[in-house]
Image: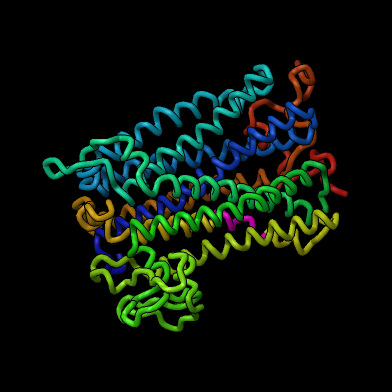
Amino acid sequence: MLGLEALELARIQFAFTVSFHIIFPAITIGLASYLAVLEGLWLKSGEEVYRDLYHFWSKIFAVNFGMGVVSGLVMAYQFGTNWSRFSSYAGSITGPLLTYEVLTAFFLEAGFLGVMLFGWNRVGRGLHYFATVMVAIGTLISTFWILSSNSWMQTPQGYQVLDGRLVPVDWLAVVFNPSFPYRLAHMAIASFLATACFVGASAAWHLLRGRDTPALRKMLSMAMWMALLVAPVQALVGDAHGLNTLEHQPAKIAAIEGHWDNSEGGPTPLILFGLPDMQREETRFKLEIPLLGSLILKHSLSEPIPALKDFPAQDRPNSTIVFWSFRVMVGLGLAMILLGLWSLWLRWRGGLFESRAFLRLALWMGPSGLIAVLAGWFTTEIGRQPWVVYGLMRTADAASSHSSVQMSLTLVTFVLVYFSLFGVGIGYMMRLVRKGPVTHEGREASDGGAGRPRTPARPLSATLEGFDDESDNPGARN
């Protein structure tokens, strides 16, 4: 396919499937915690708006959770089909870590998910809230184990090589490897921000269409508080993560910075924009700020950061890609901070829900969190190359012995199936968003009964009605 070798096709296939998959867990993590907060606020205050929002977002959560599970299963199989040498070499470490994720997080989520989604009118309030909290905790535990496994591949420790394979000798060192705490915090916060942008954009879309209800105002308000408070924290965590990466993966930092040569000595400038050229070994058309690279990464005005030419050519990541993926991530993060600050100013002026310019920006920022997550993963994974286990196993040595024809056929199949299957799922989820919250949805069972209408307790069953008829949404129109 396009003259690519089997290894390149295997990498593209894994990148394609992981890019599709990561957007669903990111929203699942954020929405699960959001639902726990909504139900907790409803139990504490008794305000119906929180219950309405809970039922609205629980439907979207259910669809998103299902797509996340399906897309995740495919990735697990790829370790055995396309990367069997990696599984043989490091499977005694990565295999148990992924098993722990299933035994703790997935079973916890699956055990309480049914109560959370179908038990609103069937169990007591306390038990239902407990189930919602357990599902939220389960998503975070899942993040813990997945990030531990991936972080170990970035900064391996707690192992020894025995008969040509990696075996664990210290599980605490394996799990809590040097990059794990930073990457766990960075990913969890990114999920919360991605969800905040999604929720805020959903509210902005309805408000721009003249649907001004207490539920929509509460959605926008809560999303903007999250952006205001958490986006700056993410910047600080990102800075700490960068310093950790500089210590353990200096070639990745050099590629991110597009910095090639330290022969002139002195501090390193920060290259804002440019075009890293791997063949010419230089960054062309660069716009740089003197001293700032050393100040950010070394906290010094004199000490240089590592340069790409300090490493053999075969050990250098692709700077052309990670240079720009990193800047996309950082740029969107700065935009989230500005969005939160603008919302604070409008809130103080009393115009948060009336400023159409702000609402349009909030709407356009809807996918920004997910794009930033994808850009961050591209930076992390491509920046690790040419290693699959950093410093121990090269990606070229990890792939299975497949032909380019086989990999081409499976890649095309994945593309067709993913765009058709998940395209339908995402479209369905967007239809739920377009419907908007329904006032006083999820009444107690006593409100219904034989021959009397009531909102179904099954979250998906409620979504099959009224997509094209907005009259079932009280207050939908002014």
Q: Residue at x 39, y 49 (%)?
A: 179
Quadrant (top left, top right, bottom left, bottom right) of the N terminus: bottom left
Q: Residue at x 36, y 63 (%)?
A: 252
In magenta stretch: residue 365? yes
In magenta stretch: residue 391? no
Q: Is residue 344 above or below residue 456?
A: below
| Direction right: furthest residue | 478
- Specify how the rendered protein is coloured: rainbow
Q: Is residue 437 above or below residue 461?
A: below
| Direction left: furthest residue | 163
Left or right of 405? Residue 346 is right
Q: Position of residue 184 (x, y in %)?
A: 46, 45
> Which residue occupies the foreground of this view, 122 or 105?
105
Q: Position of residue 57 (x, y in %)?
A: 66, 39
Q: Position of residue 29 (x, y in %)?
A: 54, 41
Circle count: 0
Q: Is residue 458 above or below residue 146?
A: above
Q: Is residue 128 above or below residue 417?
A: above
Q: Position of residue 310 (x, y in %)?
A: 28, 71
Q: Residue at x 29, y 67 (%)?
A: 316
Quadrant in which residue 254 is drawn: bottom left
Give the magenta range: 364-370
Left or right of 82? Residue 447 is right
Left or right of 353? Residue 370 is left
> Which residue occupies the foreground of this view, 207 or 466?
207
Residue 209 in sight here = no
Residue 305 in sight here = yes
